Amino acid sequence: MIPDAAQIIIIGAGAMGASTAYYLAQKGYSNIVVLEKENYLGGHTTSRCAGGFRYQFSNEINVQLSKLNIQELELFKREHKCKYELNKCGYLFLLTKDDNIDKFKSSVKMQNKLGIDTKWLESDDIRKMIPMMNTDDVVSGTFYEGDGLVDPSDVVNAYIEESKKLGVKYFNDVKVTSIELYKDSAKRVITNKGSINCSIIVNAAGPWASEIGKMVGVYIPIKPVKQQLFFTSKVSWMSKKFPVVIFQNEGLGFHREGNGILTGLNKPQEESINYNLDVDEEWKIRHCEKAIKRIPTMENLSIVSEWAGFYEVTEDDLPILGRIPQVEGFYCIAGFSGHGFMHSSICGKLLSEEIIYGTTRSLDITSLRINRFDESQCNMPEYYKI
């Protein structure tokens, strides 16, 4: 049974909600409740993501977040003896003549300036790295060996378990239906299992963040965009250290998952208003055709499993992080546009700093605040995305 009151309510028990809860509890907040609408903890979106982490971005704030996030994950793993493994296999972004080569060259220079040793590769270098892939039209690429993969379920479950030890209470199968606002920042969160009074609400609802915003009369410019992945039968030539390969112009990606290949093809940015999770068969056929073109031997593989999920997309591909000024005590941590999991640890920590101290201490998040959309201060859209 959910409690009648809490100091802080976090809506969403995915990577963002769990990390925020942990860092708040670590600093002494003892009455924290996390609500998850699914019948399991770990988050609707987190459980469906590919588990990548990378430093390769075109926006400097993303590179800074990646640096801090990996540091945080490694520290958390050491402190709590977590079982998750950071497989630093590298990310290889491949560019054709249709890509804006100069923009990617500029991004590599920026990454290098920030201490990330991203390499610029020419076509001959790439063919030597991945001879089993069709790269005839690839003219160049970028590679950083410190990028890689980690099991998202292992990470989010570790944050859930450690935050529970600090007194955080989690409730699954609890859907928020409305929020009532009162004087002096008092609030009541109404759910399908009862209501809870609180003073602080954290919106960590991912693709549903905009709907939570409507409940307090605030427009949060995040839209859900459907994406889908499939996992193949066993392959022998793709080792554990085989890089994550992204054909940038096609939005097509591959990496080793278990003994097979996990592959995704970016769908057009169409808002998924009905939140339909059925796999789009027409899109799957197109995906298979493109995948076989790049890896001809995939024609002999079978699809073992497939699933769909949602990106939570903003206009500039960057998250909305921090207080929502229209409502006292209302905060948002959502809108990561496909790279949320890889920034979840540090962003949970940053939001906890803002709630506790009134401002962040680990990194300036001015460029991630919601008012950038009202003040025409949007960031340049991200080039590195899948």
Image (cartoon, rainbow, N blue to C red):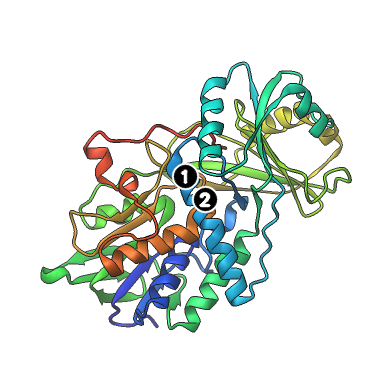
Residue 65 position, x and y percent, is 47, 51
Seen at 33% across and 69% down, the residue is 191
For the N terminus, give its image quadrant: bottom left
Q: Position of residue 324 (x, y in %)?
A: 24, 55
**Residue at (34%, 47%) from the top-left corner?**
368
Marks 1/2: CA distance? 6 Å
Q: Is residue 83 above or below residue 47?
A: below
Q: Is residue 176 visible?
A: no
The disc label shown at residue 289, or none: none
Residue 330 in view, yes or no: yes
Could you say where residue 364 lies in the image, as x and y percent from the top left? Answer: 34, 51
> In this view of the protein, which residue sits in the foreground, 333 or 285?
333
The residue at which mark 2 appears reads as: 66
Q: Which residue is mark 1?
A: 62
| SS class, disc 1 | helix
Looking at the rendering, which quadrant does residue 131 occupy? top right
User: Is 237 drawn above or below residue 11 in the view shown?
Assistant: above
Foreground residue among 321 and 14: 321
Direction from residue 119 to residue 310 in the image, left or right: left
Considering depth in this image, is 132 or 26 the residue closer to the camera?
26
With 284 as the anchor, is 161 left or right in this view?
left
Quarter that holds the C terminus: top right
Mark 1 touching mark 2, by CB under 8 A?
yes
Badge 2 marks a residue whose secondary structure is helix
Residue at the extreme top: 97
Q: x, y (%) of residue 353?
A: 34, 65
Residue type marked 1: Asn
Question: As shown in the figure, which amino acid type bears the numbered disc 2?
Answer: Ser
Quick one: label 2, few (<14), some, or many (20+) residues within 10 Å?
many
The quadrant where residue 59 appears? top left
